[in-house]
Each structure stands twice: as structure tokens, then as C-alpha cells.
Image (cartoon, coloured by chain):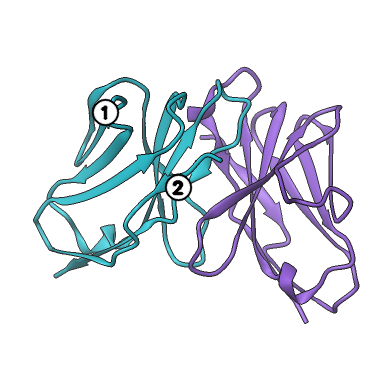
Amino acid sequence: QKEVEQNSGPLSVPEGAIASLNCTYSDRGSQSFFWYRQYSGKSPELIMFIYSNGDKEDGRFTAQLNKASQYVSLLIRDSQPSDSATYLCAVNSGGGADGLTFGKGTHLIIQP
Amino acid sequence: GAVVSQHPSRVICKSGTSVKIECRSLDFQATTMFWYRQFPKKSLMLMATSNEGSKATYEQGVEKDKFLINHASLTLSTLTVTSAHPEDSSFYICSASPSGGGADTQYFGPGTRLTVL
């Protein structure tokens, strides 16, 4: 059974600070890793994906992957109140023909 | 950008009736579409993989006779919840991958909220 674990939070971060979101996964054969943001009542929207060990930066967002530790994280710099949402970590073990396995999500609150 | 639509966005039905949800890729062809379900305060759970022109692949624990999936064209997949019961009330979300695309190009629809009375 593939599992993706996240701390459900809420994680409260002051505006302008760095928010750090963490995720672990059980399937060592996982190949693709994704971070989605979901607002209440809405469907997920893709923030970033990462395939290789190390860091990947996109604007204020940095994804970090450590396959040896089966750990993936998302850093949000200069946090804004609009970043307040639930962040879902998702993992794909195949090459695109497989659906995603999602974690339960971390509820992030950015305090003005 | 790639757009996936779902219809209806919200549906309320009586227990025992069937409900059909449509998922369309508006500006790309999708060989594969995925159906997810999300209960309140829970994560998305993959229900099934819909393959154009062939039978859907269901995840363990998902009843294929209850959740009928049809993927008759490269731009449309439908999910029919048959004989719906209150425990089927959930947020149903589809996603679509452009033909030849990898997992990073999986686009989500806006979701359909089903309430069974």
C-alpha cells in the first residue's frame, strides 16, 4: 500500500517568513513528486513537480527531494496571506499512466 | 493553457438514483483520465484510471459496478454513480493527461460536489 504522510497542521507562519512543508512517502520506487495547493471547496492546482534529488526553485517556491530518506519538502519564501491554503503532496510511481497518491495535506495559515 | 471542465459542478439527488458526471479536456486530447474522490477534510483518493477505448482500471476497494466509467472519446470521460447512497456524497474530481504527456502534465477539473439525500 503506497502511503504519503504529511502533518495536517495547521501550520501558522507570519507574513514575510518562510513556510516549510514536509512530506514522506513509503514507496521507494516512486519517481515523480508534486506539490498542489488546494483552497477550500476547490480542486487542486499544481505548484511544482520534482523528479531528481536536490532542490528545484520556481519564484518564491522551492521543492526539495531526498530519495534516500524518502522525503520531499516545499519552502515558500516571503509568505503572503494569499498563500493560506491546504498543501497536498502527491507521488507518482509510474511514467504518467498512473494516478497520483496524495497525502492528507497540510493546512497553512499565513498571519498578516 | 490546458483546461479540464466538469459538469455538473454541483448535484443533489435522492438515494437510489444514478448520477452522471462528465469530464472534458477542452483544448487537448487525453488518452488517460483519472477520477478521484475527496471526503471532507480528507485527501484525494484515486478511484480509477479511465483509458480511451478500453475498460477503466479501478483501485482496490472501488466497486466497478457502482462507479461506471466510460471514456468514449479522447476528450470526454464520464463517471456514473449508480444507485447512489448518502455515503457516496463527496467531491469528485477528474484529471486528464495530454496524450504522450507525463505525470507532470496532469490537469485537474474543478470538481463536482455530489450530495445524496
Q: Residue A66 carries which label?
A: 1
Q: Dot 2 falls on which chain?
A: A
- Sequence-first disc among 2 and 1: 2
The residue furthest top is B100
Please name the residue shown 52% across and 39% down the image. Answer: A2
Read off the residue under disc 2.
A45
Classify mark 1: helix, strand or loop: strand
Q: Callout 2, which amino acid?
A: Glu
Image quadrant assignment for residue A39: bottom left
Is there CB contact under 8 Å for labels 2 and 1?
no
Residue A82, placed above or below residue B27: below
Please name the residue shown 72% across and 26% down the image. Answer: B31
Chain B as rendered: colour: purple
Chain A as rendered: colour: cyan
Quarter the C terminus of chain B occupies? bottom right
Q: Callout 1, which amino acid?
A: Asn
Q: Position of residue A38 (x, y in %)?
A: 43, 56
Horizontally, residue A11 falls left or right of residue A15, namely right
Please name the residue shown 84% across and 48% down the image. Answer: B64
A111 or A31, nearer to the observer: A31
Classify mark 2: helix, strand or loop: strand
Q: Where is residue B79 in the image (x, y as percent from the top left)?
A: 79, 51
The residue furthest bottom is B117
Tally of marks: 2
Depth check, mark 2 against mark 1: the one in front is 1
